[in-house]
Structures are given as C-alpha cells and as structure tokens.
C-alpha cells in the first residue's frame, strides 16, 4: 500500500496511514467528531480500492448505537464492512450525524457508492474486520481517530 497517498486535496488532512504488521492502521481527522468518522470510513475503503473511482450510484442509510465514542467508531466501521461483504458495495461519500441520547451515542448516516466491479475498481486489500486494538477518539484541535483493520 502506498503510505504517501496525499489525502488532503490541498486543504485539511483527511487521513494518513501508519505501519502495522499484518494489518492496516490509520488516523482519520476532522474538525468535528462527525467529520473524523466520515474520513475514517473513507480511509477504510481506500484500503480496499481507489475511492476516486467509485461512482455515486447507490445510497444506504445506517444507524448505529453504542455506549461510548470508541465503541461507536468500531460499530460504525463494522457496519460498513457488513454492507461491503453482503451487498458488495464500496463507498466514497459519507455523511454522519452523532448525538448523545441518554447514556448512549447514536450515529445516523448516509453512504453513497456503488457495487464493486473488478473491471472498474482496483482490488487492494480485503478488510476482514475492525479491531479495538489501539482504537482511539481524541478531541484535540478538532478530532482524530485511530483505527487498525485486520486484513
């Protein structure tokens, strides 16, 4: 995998990869918690394929409820993997809203992409699962989240 991928598009850095043995690890950034989760989804699909080649054809709505922000990030990314594994979808556009409801956090999101087509989409690494290992959600001049994927 090319760890020098410029994901900034000339503005704020969206994500960057770091080395992890037998896994893929990354930090995703955002000025808000929602933006950092959106960029975490984008980075995960960048591990699988070139997200710039994904057309905005299919739209999916998701809702995830968890007891804390780290669990919410884990459950959100696992839901994306589930949609990929079951419907063969890859996504490049993410919009999420996160609210605290009582003791829980609830993420409501819209994902836009298309069915994976090996004639169009580059096949990179298969993501088997998200891990809790070293997963973090940090609020510091915006937000950054750390994710390690099991490949």
Image (spheres, helix red, strand yellow):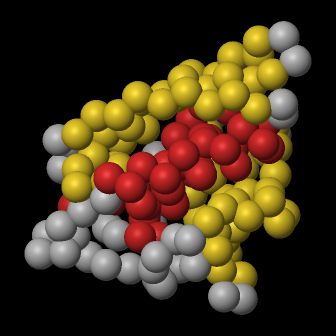
* Image-quadrant location for residue 24: bottom right
Residue 21: % across, % down: 71, 88
Residue furthest to the top: 102
The answer, for residue 52, to whether it is visible in the render is no
Residue 143: % across, % down: 72, 39
- Quadrant where the C terminus sits is bottom right
* Image-quadrant location for residue 90: bottom left
Q: Is residue 99 above or below residue 110?
A: above
Q: Is residue 70 left or right of residue 115?
A: right
Q: Nearer the viewer, residue 12 or 90?
A: 90
Residue at 36% in and 41% down: 93
Q: Is residue 34 above or below residue 86?
A: above
Q: Is residue 16 above or below residue 40?
A: below
Residue 104: % across, % down: 81, 22
* Image-quadrant location for residue 110: top left
Residue at 80% in and 59% down: 132
Residue at 45% in and 79% down: 125
Q: Is residue 109 above or below residue 87?
A: above
Residue furthest to the right: 103
Residue 17: % across, % down: 60, 71
Q: Is residue 126 left or right of residue 70?
A: left
Residue furthest to the left: 119
């Amino acid at each position: 995998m090319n760890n020098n991928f410029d994901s900034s598009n000339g503005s704020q850095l969206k994500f960057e990869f770091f080395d992890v043995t037998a896994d893929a690890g990354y930090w995703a950034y955002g000025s808000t918690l929602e933006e950092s989760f959106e960029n975490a989804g984008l980075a995960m699909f960048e591990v699988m394929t070139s997200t710039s080649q994904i057309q905005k054809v299919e739209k999916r709505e998701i809702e995830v409820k968890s007891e804390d922000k780290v669990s919410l990030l884990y459950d959100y990314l696992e839901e994306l993997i589930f949609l990929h594994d079951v419907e063969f979808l890859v996504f490049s556009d993410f919009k999420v809203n996160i609210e605290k409801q009582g003791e829980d956090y609830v993420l409501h999101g819209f994902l836009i992409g298309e069915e994976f087509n090996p004639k169009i989409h580059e096949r990179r690494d298969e993501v088997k699962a998200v891990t809790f290992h070293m997963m973090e959600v940090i609020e510091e001049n915006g937000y950054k989240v750390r994710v390690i994927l099991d490949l």
